[in-house]
Image (cartoon, grey):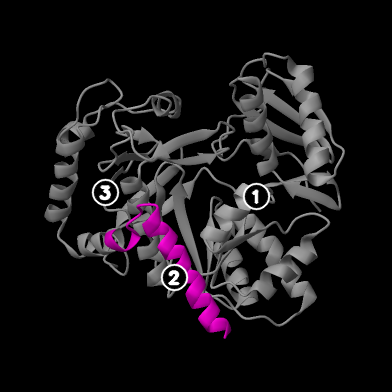
Amino acid sequence: MKRLSNRLRYLLTRFFFCAMGLQVNYWRNRVENLWLATDIERKKEQEQLLIRNRPLNADGTEVTNIEELSKSPLLSKQMLRVNAKKTNSYQGRRFNRHTAGTTGESTSISVIPEELGRMLGVRDYCFRKWGFRLGEREARLWGRPEKGLKSWCKNFILNRRVFHPVGSETETEVRDLLKWEPEYIYGYSSLLLEAAKVIQHLDIRFKSPKCVICTAEAILPTQKEYLSTVFGAPVAEEYGSTEFDVIAFECHRGHRHIVNPWLYVENSSDSCIISDCSRRSLDIIRYDAADVIRLELNECREIGSEVIVTLLEGRSVNQFAYASKGSKFHAVHFGNLSDKYMNENSDVFGIKVVQLEYGSFEVIVTSVPKKGLLDLEQYIKRYIKYEVGYDITVKCTNEDRFPVTKQSYFISNLTLS
């Protein structure tokens, strides 16, 4: 009976995709066929899309082939944010994608059904390589609990539940997660590790998922092995972003393959540079994604391209802030609150949060907020108190005395024992 119920929920989710104009099956098949094609055929596909879309590079020049693309200047995150606020001639339905970002600055873009369909097709292609499908029961371990009717409806449509295994409700959250018996678990590496610690402590029996997917934060091989042992499932790494969704995905042999055939990803010693040849709603040519990666050719063709990501920096698993020795919360709250504060006050500034001592934080902003530093201090303290229940000390300044880091907007100077 439960198997039938799960089957019906999967079909319902896929029906919703179709009703919203998202041709997931079609695009998954296109992805599969393109990775079976030759390099010349894939390049031809990319150039045909460039001719159709005629995207503008950072200088405002049309790009119609790979040679012109490779000679284009870099597109910064700041420039992309400005471009994303502009509207083009497409007047149909759009879907918003939004994140607080790992740099402390939010990213908001909208995509048209064709573009979101491609993204979901790539995701479904990756998932099926691990024995499950997009739309099957998902447990998502995210940076904060989701509240409200809108979030509930979205998660119901996507056949997923969001869990937050940090704080006073950690054990309850983990028990609920296991009781829900997801087909796969997807989430922040740090939260997956926290959940694993609780499961090991509780020593309870549960049905193992088909796969555990780590995203948004780096994870060490020993940590992956630990997760695999505790959850009784293989662990795969995903490298993605709000702008492109899945960029690289791990195969069973441990290689992170480039998996979106419409992305042109360049090897750079300084940053990850990505162009989307298929994008119609937004020009993304030689976009500086701010993550440091190393690309290499590999004979493995289990999934996606022979190009694999052998180095990925710019994201960190050490993402917990401590209100006291025994009380911690995920640092993503600082990104969420800064994004919320800026939206509420029509303000924009970069942010870096440094933990100095237990319960004490210094917040460095790139420019003084419109309402002043004191207003931001009070806002942060109220937000953390309301969201996670902890009282913290906050000092806001726009004088940065800490070294630049590409890892995150959060830095901890604590020495944990």
Report helix, strand or loop for mark 1: helix
The residue shown at (79%, 38%) is: 384
- Numbered label attached to residue 376: none
> Which one is in front, 279 or 12?
12
In the image, what residue type sits under mark 2? Answer: Leu
**Mark 1 or 3, nearer chain start:** 1
Report the residue marked by disc 2.
11
Locate residue 3, reporting x and y percent: 53, 83
Quarter where residue 382 is shown: top right
User: Residue 49 in magenta?
Assistant: no
Give the residue drawn at x 63%, y 16%: 367
The magenta stretch is 1-26
* Residues at marks 2 and 3, CA–CA distance in whole angstroms: 28 Å
Q: Secondary structure at mark 3?
A: loop
> Outermost residue, bottom direction?
1
Q: Which mark is drawn over residue 149?
A: 1
Q: Nearer the viewer, residue 156 or 100?
A: 156
Label 2 packing within 10 angstroms: few (<14), some (14-19), many (20+): some
Give, as a three-letter code, the residue at label 3.
Trp
- Look at the image and say whether residue 11 sits in the magenta stretch: yes
Residue identified by numbered label 3? 262
